[in-house]
Amino acid sequence: MPIVQQGSINTTALIVPDLYVQIVPPQVTLLNGVPTNVIGMVGTAQWGPVNSPTIIGNMAMYAQAFGAVQNRKYDMGTAVAAAVINGANNFRCVRATDGTDVAATAVVQSTCLTLTGKYTGTLGNTIVATLAQGSAAGTWKVTVAAPTLAPEVFDNIGSGLSGNALWVAIAAAINIGTSVQRGPSQIVVAAAGAGVAAPVAASFTLAGGTDGATTITGTVLIGQDTIPRKGMYALRNQGVSVGVLVDCDDSTTWANQVAFGLSEGIYMIGVGPAGDTIANAVSAKATAGIDNYAFKLLFGDWIYFLDTANGVTRLISPQGFVAGLLGNLSPEQSSLNKQLYGVVGTQKSNANQTYSSAELQALAQAGIDVVTNPVPGGSYFGCRIGHNSSSNALTQGDNYTRMTNYIAATINAGMGKYVGRLQSVTVRAQAAATLSNFLSSMEQQGMIGAVNGGPAYSVQIDANNNPMNRVALGYMQADVKVIYLSVIEKFLVNVEGSQATVIRTSTSNQ
């Protein structure tokens, strides 16, 4: 009396009389949408892995992984801080360097032990390693600490050892750990030398670490798309929804960002140089040849930001603020008229200037967004246009980019299970139901819909779009149409008033 999974036996060729129980999997498969709150950041830092995407959820996690916010251009921590203020809480951070980054080091008792920072960067210059008597008699203890990093204690090392063997044991404790609870150091790497001198209790500060952030360019932030990937390309296959090359105001990178955004389904947020003019911005965009929904270009009216880590108010790119807002919004929403938090002022507002209708029109026509105060909703800072860089009226909204990427990524993540199955009426119906259930959920949540009535979506998988000549070649085609909800950009109110105005009312028989 075998129990088998459906499809694992040939039910038309059974020989032995018996009871055969087949486990039939659920006939309707459900799709759960992919996350749309993942923000990819590429910039410099004073610590941490280089060109390696790291999951960050808040500023405390950032400090542990990459050190403190730095008062300089291209600083990744600054952009993350601006995004966090606006509700972002899911980042993939990639540290970029110009190749001159160096790890800090310290030599302990001449040739006995060398300590090197696990990562390059100036944070390594604050690492202090303390050598002291261990808790157990005849042992030694090493404590490694640095600002923003959790201190590490390696205790009871080298019982019964002396000379070079003791230094080898100390290095092993740091590199391998001393127990399940005290694993290898995440701050330093140790190398035992040839020294045989007995340890002397003392503290040693590492030195010589550099960030590799002095000659950062747009090319460095873009990186390379060959393995090992660097810069922007390290964000491939990371599930990123919104992408930022921090403070990258180099217009020659925009085309590459567009191509990457299209290939990965990422909404790339670009920016013009600080203090830019509208004429120059319009010209730069036209020269770059970017007219595409995958890229949002922000005008170079940079933002004054209160940097509490460094105790200064400084000028930073608007990218972090806008990326944080978008990452915190549902994908059908637009950045238009939504309040941005943490903005002390912009270059324009601090000069007591406001944008004229003609200036805003020039930016909107060019496909360039800008942070202003006021916005239509009131006297607060927000995105004034809510557009990407496309000139197509049907694809230029933030909502088009994010909804299209969201739907495509969700289908891509969940519909592959039908590949390899036999195409039948039943399988077609199952695939159609999977897609319809996902879209129905979106409609129920108010993410899509036909405001004037009618269906919000359609899914077709039948003989009409799957002729036999295609089926015979292994194709199954689904045609999906979805109606996005429109973002109100122009609200027209007609007002008629005079002493002679007539208001007509109608009555009906009861």
Image (cartoon, rainbow, N blue to C red):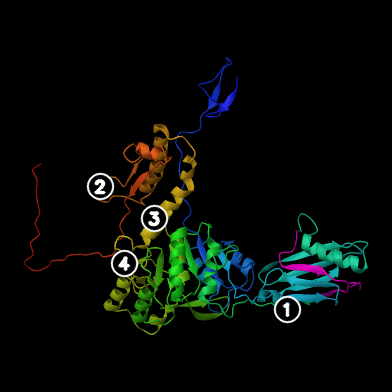
Locate residue 119: give its quadrant.
bottom right
In the image, which is nearer the foreground, mark 2 or mark 1? Answer: 1
User: Is 248 on the left or on the right of 17, as rendered?
Assistant: left
Q: CA distance from mark 1 to mark 4?
A: 53 Å
Majority SS type along the magenta span: loop
Q: Is residue 322 visible?
A: no
Q: Secondary structure at mark 3?
A: helix
Residue at 71% x, 79% y is 208
Q: Amino acid at mark 3?
A: Thr
Residue 115, compared with residue 394, is above or below; it is below
Which residue is at 78% across, 60% downward?
A: 176
**Amino acid type of the residue tagged 1 in the rendering:** Ala
- Camera-nearest residue between 448 and 249: 249
User: What number is the disc on residue 391?
Assistant: 4
User: What residue does disc 2 label?
Assistant: 453
Q: Report the side of 492 relative to 460 (left or right).
A: left
Q: Which residue is disc 3 drawn over?
A: 404
Among the two numbered marks 3 and 1 on one chain, the one whose residue lies closer to the N terminus: 1
Q: What separation in Å lies between label 2 and label 3 (alpha carbons)? A: 22 Å
Q: Nearer the viewer, residue 78 or 366?
A: 366
* Residue holding disc 1: 207
Tell me the CA gap for discs 3 and 1.
50 Å
SS state under label 1: loop
Instruction: Please state, as top left, top right, bottom left or bottom right, where the C terminus lies in the image.
Output: top left
Classify the position of the N terminus by image quarter: top right
